[in-house]
Image (spheres, helix red, strand yellow):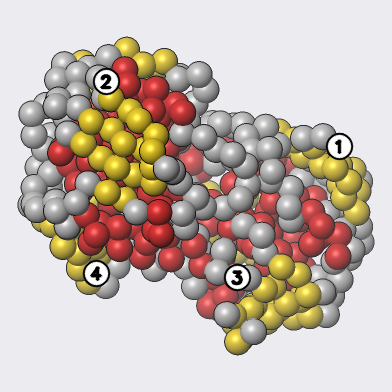
Amino acid sequence: MHKIVIKGGVPLNGEVQVSGAKNAVLPLLFATLLAEGQSEICNVPALRDIDTAVALLDILGATTERVADCCRIDATAIRSDEAPYDLVRTMRASVLVLGPLLARCGHARVSLPGGCAIGARPIDQHLKGFEALGARITLDHGYVEAQAERLRGAHIIFDMPTVGGTENLLMAAALAEGETIIENAAREPEIVQLAEALISMGAKIEGAGTARISIQGVSSLRPLEITVMPDRIEAGTFMIAAAMTGGDLLVRGARQQDQEVLLQKMVEAGVMIHPEQGGLRVVGPDKLLPVDVRTSAFPGFPTDMQAQFMVMMALARGTSRISENVFENRFMHVCELQRMGANISIDGHSAVIHGVEQLLGAPVMATDLRASACLVLAGLAAENTTEVSRIYHLDRGYERIEEKLAGLGARIERVSA
C-alpha cells in the first residue's frame, strides 16, 4: 500500500505530455478478439486497468506481449469464453468482452461487472441490444450467459446513451449478418476511435460520433494496428491543476474538439486557454470566478471531470453549483474536501460550493478514480501537507501522475503507507 504526500502552494509551470486514453484502450484491446492474427496497439499507458484487461485476454487464450508502449495481441486461438468474477469485479470495462466473444465464438459467459462504486451502472441496455441481435441471454449466479449461432442485424434503440453499450454492440454487430442500426448511441471521442479501428479491420460502419450508427456486418475481420488517442480526462485534470495553482502549463496532446464544454467553463472561471502546436496552454488567474455546471453525456460536461472541477470551484470567489446527472453516487469526495476546509453542501443531485480563500492540507482518503485525482489537485493548491491514501484508485487511470506533476514543480511523492 502506498500514499501520495503533497506539500502544496507551488504554481505548476512547464510542459506535460498526456498519455494514451484509458477509456479508448480498453475497448480496443477487446476488439482484437474479433480477428485471427496479431494486432498491435500503441501509445498504451501503464495502468492497472490495462493490466487487468491484458490478464483477461490471456485467460481467454490470446497471447499478449508488451513492447515499450505497444501491446501485441494474437487472438487466433481462443480457448475460453468465460470472463471470471475475480477479474471483472475489479474493472467494469471487462464486460466489453461479451460482444466480441459472442460474435466470434457464438457464446460467452461473463461475470456481472464491478469497478468504482459511483453508482449502479446496470448493463441492461447491453443485454437488450444483444437480444435484438438474436442472442439468448440468461443470468446465472452473477454471470451473464449469451448464445447465438450467428448474430443478425437489428434496429436497436437505447433508452439512454450508454458508452459501454454502444461499444459492446458496435463490436458485436461488426460480425453480424446484415445491417444493424444503433439509435441514441453514445457520441464520445473514444467511440469514434473504436469505430475507426473496426473500419481499419474491415468493418463497414457509418455515423460514429452521432446519435445514429449504422453497421453492415461482414463475415470476418483482419488484425488491428492503431495508435491510441490522448486521454482527454487526464488532459483536463492537468489543465485544472494549472488553473487552480496559478500556473502556466502547456498540456501536450490536449485536443480542443474533445472537451469544448470543459474549456468553455474554465474560460468562464477566468482561466486563459490558448491552442498551441500539439496541445493547449493554460494560464491560471489571480482569482477564480464561480461557474455552474451540469454533467451530461458527450458533448456535454463530462462526469469524469466533475470532481476535479468541484475542487477548483472550492477556491473560486463566490458560490457555484454542480449538478451530477449521470451517476447517483458521485459526490463521495465532498467529505474529504470538507476535511481540507472546502465549504460544500449537498442538495439532492447537486453540490453547492461556497469558495474559500485557502484549502488546508490534511490526511484524506480516495474513494474512486476521479475522486482520487480531485484530492491530489486539492493538495497541490492547499497550505501545508496533504496525504492521499488508497491511491490504488489513482493507478487505475493516471499514468505516473506524481512523476509528471513533480516535473512541473509540484512537491509531491509516493511513499509507503
- The residue located at (17%, 34%) in the rendering is 106
Q: Which disc is residue 88 wearing?
A: none
Query: Residue 410: horizontal and vertical position, in percent?
Result: 66, 77
Q: Residue 126 vs residue 105: left or right?
A: right
Q: Residues under labels 4 and 2: Cα distance?
A: 35 Å
Q: Is residue 258 visible?
A: yes
User: Tag 2 or tag 3, which sits nearer the N-term?
Assistant: 2
Task: Point out the frontmost of discs 1 and 4.
Answer: 1
Residue labelled with disc 3 = 391
The amino acid marked with disc number 3 is Ile
Label located before the other in sequence (1 or 4): 4
- In the picture of the structure, the residue carrying the numbered disc 2 is 133
The structure residue drawn at horizontal position 34% and vertical position 57%, both measured from the top left corner, is 53
Q: Does residue 124 appear to the left or right of 297 in the view shown? A: left
Q: Nearer the viewer, residue 396 or 188?
A: 396
Mark 1 and mark 3: Cα distance apart in space: 28 Å
From the viewer's perspective, tell me whether residue 244 is left or right of residue 139: right
Q: Disc 4 designates what residue?
A: 66
- Compute the Cα span from label 3 to label 4: 24 Å
Label annotation for residue 347: 1
| SS label for mark 4 | strand
Seen as rendered, the residue at the extreme front is: 141
Q: Is residue 401 above or below residue 267?
A: below
Q: Percent x, y for residue 207?
A: 33, 22
